[in-house]
Amino acid sequence: MGKLFDRLKYDVRFSEGLEACINCGTCTAICPAASFYDYDPREIADALQVENEKILEELLKGEKIWYCGQCMSCKTRCPRGNTPGLLILALRNLSIETGFYLHSHRGKQMYVLKKLIGDTILATGYCVHADGVDTGLFPEAGPVWDWIRKNSSEIYNLFGNSYNKPGNGSLRKISKKSMNELKAIFNITGCTDRFEKLENDAAECAKKLNLEYNDTHLNKYFQLMYSKNPNEDES
């Protein structure tokens, strides 16, 4: 597997995100995630400075690197110009590449995000597209969302956009040229490979748990990852 820190340093987000943390705690004070989780971006930055392989492995296997919401508030306030949010991205990528993310429930839930958001981006060019939302997964939206979906063509075109057609506005059809460029970005940045690994690992996990698995988000493993409380014992 090679030394973990050597692999981490290869990620430009690590070299750009950490210069010299002075432990002031400004990033933690401004961090929204720190208000809700046992998460401290200052501790992450400080831990990475010592370049301890054991500490790094614990981070890659743990839950904390998945708490960050990527708002990048840390970047705006750090007096040293550090960006813990970028460090988190580098850690997440390495966690997936090494397979250490499978030790974390929230890490394994990246498969859910891949199915709900990643696949939608590659199919439509949007993170979320109204036509692709499974309203059964969001019961809090109530019957209104189902009604809108049923009458989508009429409703969305009332706002003067180009719903599922070439033109301007939200929900317009993204051109084939732009979609090809988007997929090329995913390929070049390694995101396509990471998506494939998430799918392959999910299939293996489903097999171990004796759960039905297929390429859709309706499989039993997806339902488990989507709905399970992280504090519950999977076994």
Image: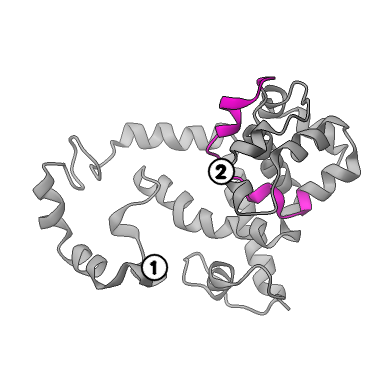
Rendered position, 150 above or below 22: below
Q: Is residue 213 left or right of residue 146?
A: right
Residue 22 is marked as none
SS of the residue under disc 2: helix
The residue stretch that appears in magenta: 60-81
Residue drawn 69% across and 47% down?
65
Residue at 13% in and 56% down = 155
Residue 67 horizontal/vertical position (percent) = 63, 50
Q: Nearer the viewer, residue 64 or 207?
A: 64
Quarter of the image holding residue 105?
bottom right
Q: How is the image coloured?
A: one colour
| Residue at x-position 19% and y-position 35% | 168
**Image quadrant for the N terminus?**
top right
Which residue does the numbered mark 1 point to in the structure image? 138
Closest to the observer: 210 or 127? 127
Q: Give the quadrant of residue 112.
A: bottom right
Q: Amino acid at mark 1?
A: Phe
79 or 106, which is in the foreground? 79
**Residue 85, placed above or below residue 79:** below
Amino acid identity at mark 2: Thr
Q: 49 or 227, which lies in front?
A: 49
Mark drawn on residue 192? 2
